[in-house]
Image (cartoon, rainbow, N blue to C red):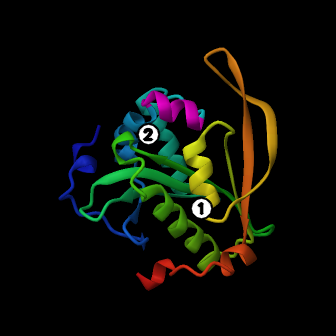
């Protein structure tokens, strides 16, 4: 694991800001940190992503950096501490669509950082990119994620029944989306106003 990625005093470029968090471009050296977050059993269950070999994640991150259909960032706290991974993936600028992904470190959950990061990401998606729709998929029993998504204005569109397997049990996934006009109707301050 890259120890620099965990040090609060390490200066990372802040590409985009929320009210309390900032985004910095993800780097291959962040693989160890993301691997650690993915190893949390709660995160693995809720995201449906199990940690594989570290070298495979590093290679995947190298691919993400070159992939023009996704934008991946570390979420930074005000003191520079990395707190999570957020991304827009499957970006299709012709159709104007993308999918959002957010993973917070266990010690930073439940403090409002997820809501702030998601608001900042939707500001990027609709304020800087030509997106018309951003969607999210999560387990139907992931109450924390569903609450954060609803708070950000995402509308639940439906359920993908028996969409994933975890510990021998099938789980349903909820599909949610936020449209440009719904984002435009929000009265909160935008990321560029912070």
Question: On the image, numbered disc 1 is attached to which residue?
Answer: 151
- Lateral position of residue 1 relative to residue 75, left or right: left
- Is residue 87 something one can see in this rendering? yes
Mark in front: 2 vs 1: 1
Q: Nearer the viewer, residue 76 or 153?
A: 153
- Is residue 49 something one can see in this rendering? no
State the separation of the CA atoms marked 2 and 1.
33 Å
- In terms of image quadrants, where is residue 32? top left
- In terms of image quadrants, where is residue 127? bottom right
Residue at horizontal 42%, vertical 49%? 110
Per the image, is 65 magenta? no
Residue projecting furthest to the top: 168
Question: On the image, numbered disc 2 is attached to which residue?
Answer: 58
- In terms of image quadrants, where is residue 75? bottom left
Residue at horizontal 66%, vertical 14%? 168
Residues tagged 2 and 1 counted as in contact (Cβ below 8 A): no
Q: Position of residue 182 (x, y in %)?
A: 72, 74
Q: Which residues are magenta?
A: 39-47
């Amino acid at each position: 694991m890259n120890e620099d990625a965990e040090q609060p005093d390490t200066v990372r470029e802040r590409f985009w800001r929320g009210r309390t968090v900032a985004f910095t471009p993800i780097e291959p050296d962040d693989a160890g940190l993301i691997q650690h977050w993915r190893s949390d059993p709660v995160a693995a269950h809720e995201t449906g992503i199990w940690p594989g070999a570290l070298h495979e994640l590093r290679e995947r991150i190298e691919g993400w950096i070159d992939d023009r259909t996704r934008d991946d960032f570390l979420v930074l706290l005000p003191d520079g501490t990395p707190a999570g991974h957020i991304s827009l993936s499957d970006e299709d600028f012709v159709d104007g669509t993308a999918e959002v992904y957010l993973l917070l470190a266990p010690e930073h959950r439940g403090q409002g950082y997820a809501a702030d990061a998601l608001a900042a990401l939707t500001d990027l998606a609709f304020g800087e990119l030509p997106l018309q729709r951003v969607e999210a998929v999560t387990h139907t029993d992931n109450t924390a994620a569903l609450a954060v998504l609803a708070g950000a204005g995402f509308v639940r569109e439906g359920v993908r029944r028996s969409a994933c397997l975890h510990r021998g049990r099938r789980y349903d996934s909820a599909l949610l989306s936020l449209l440009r006009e719904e984002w435009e109707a929000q009265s909160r301050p935008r990321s560029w106003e912070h």
